[in-house]
Amino acid sequence: MSEPDPKRLRLGLPKGSLQETTQRLFTQAGFKLRVTERSYYPDIDDPEIDCILIRAQEMARYVEQGVLDAGITGIDWTTECGAEVDEVADLRAPWPNYGPVRWVVAVPEDSPIRSVRDLEGMRIATEVVNLARRYLEQHGVAAEVEFSWGATEVKPPILADAIIDVTETGSSLRANRLRVIDTVIESTPRLIANRRSLADAWKARKIERLTLLLRGAIHAVDRVGLMLNVPKESLEQVLKLLPALGAPTISTLADDRWVAINTVIEEKLVTELLPQLSEAGARGIVEYPLIKIIE
């Protein structure tokens, strides 16, 4: 692969479970990102960015090598391959596969294994062999770690005594009659960057601006804006009800007995809050969606 252009950012986007949500994130951030079924080179409406689809497991290695200037992957995979990259942003969001996941040690429900100490001499199946070995070493436990090619949760008790597998809700582990005994690492999607790329002024600024837009989109995901008119005698009561993201904006109206309030709240509070605001005297209440919030 050719060397990255000094005036273009080569950006790795995760293929697989993170792909659809990553595309959603970029759309929310204001980009037009088009991913065709058979191409590994998505089109983006920024002429200074070249996108490449790569599996999250490989992303950090290519970013470390400088083949990519930056990329999105879970911190679990960056840790697994021991890549020397800089973490630019935690991109956790309340979307599918963008929330926290855990790599856990799990054993059959009827297993006598109760703690990491009980893994001494046991066989452990996992996709994250390096993470598993470092975890066992930290606990002073010697065990056999085998790479698992998938369907890891079905391997105990015949093919393995325990597994180290990724879970978001634990439902798959429970369905396979497995019991969690410890957490190895919690992971969320991160934007990572090559250190030489960050030392380049142009690329560092490009990454910084990209980060600003992505974070702004994430901050707006579960929030909405509210506009409302309030009689001055009710202002104090209304302000006590508003759990604002920041100080609400208060402006005067043509009728000097009233003021207008503009604020941002968590969307989950709307159904309870709006009736309370109305009862406190607010009128002309308007709820509106947010695209980005730049803090």
Image: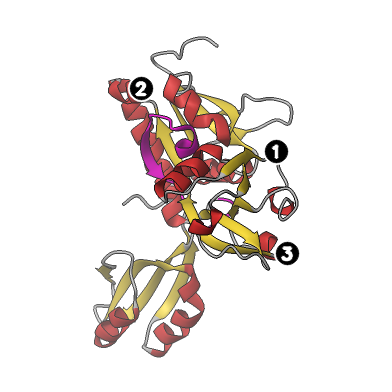
Q: Is residue 214 in view from this perspective?
A: yes
Q: Where is mark 1, residue-wise?
A: 149
User: Residue 130, how many percent across, how many down?
Assistant: 51, 37
User: Residue 82, how many percent across, how many down?
Assistant: 43, 32
Circle 3 packing at 10 Å, graded few (<14), some (14-19), many (20+), is: few
Q: Where is mark 3, residue-wise?
A: 175
User: Residue 254, how many percent across, how many down?
Assistant: 28, 72
Which residue: 42% across, 34% down?
192
Q: Confirm or deny contact between disc 3 and disc 1 (CB under 8 A).
A: no
Element under label 3?
A: helix
Q: Which mark sits nearer the N-terminus, 1 or 2?
A: 1
Q: CA distance from mark 2 to mark 3?
A: 45 Å
Q: Is residue 171 left or right of residue 88?
A: right
Q: In the rendered view, tell whether residue 156 sits above or below residue 36.
A: below
Q: Is residue 30 in view from this perspective?
A: no
Circle 2 packing at 10 Å, graded few (<14), some (14-19), many (20+), is: many
- Give, as a single range, the part of the protein colored magenta: 78-97
Q: Is residue 260 left or right of residue 71?
A: left
Q: Which of the two residues, 219 or 198, is positioned nearer the viewer here?
A: 198
Residue 89 within the magenta-colored segment of the rendering: yes
Q: Which mark sits nearer the N-terminus, 2 or 3?
A: 3
Q: How is the image coloured?
A: secondary structure
Which residue: 70% across, 38% down?
149
| Dot 1 amino acid type | Trp
| Dot 2 amino acid type | Ser
Residue at the extreme top of the image, as rendered: 2
Q: CA distance from mark 3 to mark 1?
A: 20 Å
Residue 60 within the magenta-colored segment of the rendering: no
User: Residue 225, how many percent across, how many down?
Assistant: 42, 64
Q: Where is mark 2, residue-wise?
A: 197
